[in-house]
Amino acid sequence: MIAHEQGGLLNAAKFAAGLGISGQSVARYLDLLADLMLVRRLPPWHANVGKRLVKSLRVYIRDAGLAHALPGIGTMEMLPGHPVVGGSWEGFCIENLIAAAPHGTEAGFIALLPGPRSI
């Protein structure tokens, strides 16, 4: 399930319902996967900007080969048309940027929720 949600906001309730387990079990499994360095939980960057910031984690499978194998992407020809290609590329870039960042750098993301539009 994580491979199909690569780079998406973590919805533990959706994972729990799909797997038939509790939300606490999902959190414990994600903790284990993160401790084993198989999954990266990218936290949101917080600043109180009118309370319109996303506050959920983003979840990435850290190994691109594993992220492609789990949803059944076996060849390069299958990759461009697959729905996970964007999240896969994003995860690959994030892993490389974090590896190149100075020691002690804290990674995060920011995503604003859509607000009211003026015409």
Image (cartoon, grey):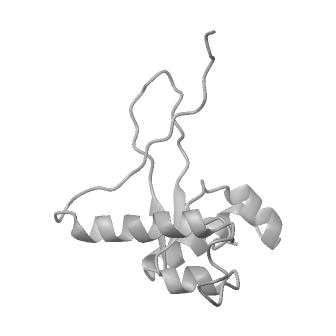
Quarter of the picture holding the N terminus: bottom right
Identity of the residue furthest to the top in this view = 119
Quarter of the picture holding the C terminus: top right
Identity of the residue furthest to the bottom in this view = 74
Q: How many marks?
A: 0
User: Hey, which quadrant is residue 78 in on the image?
Assistant: bottom right
Q: Residue 34 in the image: x percent, y percent?
A: 47, 74
Q: Residue 72 in the image: x percent, y percent?
A: 70, 85
104 or 68, which is in the foreground?
A: 68
Residue in the image at 61% along x and 10% along y: 118
Q: Residue 17 in the image: x percent, y percent?
A: 81, 63
79 or 65, which is in the foreground?
A: 79
Residue in the image at 43% along x and 80% along y: 37
Q: Report the side of 72 relative to 66 (left or right).
A: right
Residue in the image at 56% along x and 64% along y: 87
The image shows residue 97, relative to residue 36, as above or below, that is above
Q: Report the side of 99 relative to 111 (left or right).
A: left
Q: Residue 69 in the image: x percent, y percent?
A: 62, 87
Residue in the image at 54% along x and 70% along y: 88
Q: Report the side of 83 relative to 36 (left or right).
A: right
Identity of the residue furthest to the front in this view = 77
Identity of the residue furthest to the left in this view = 102
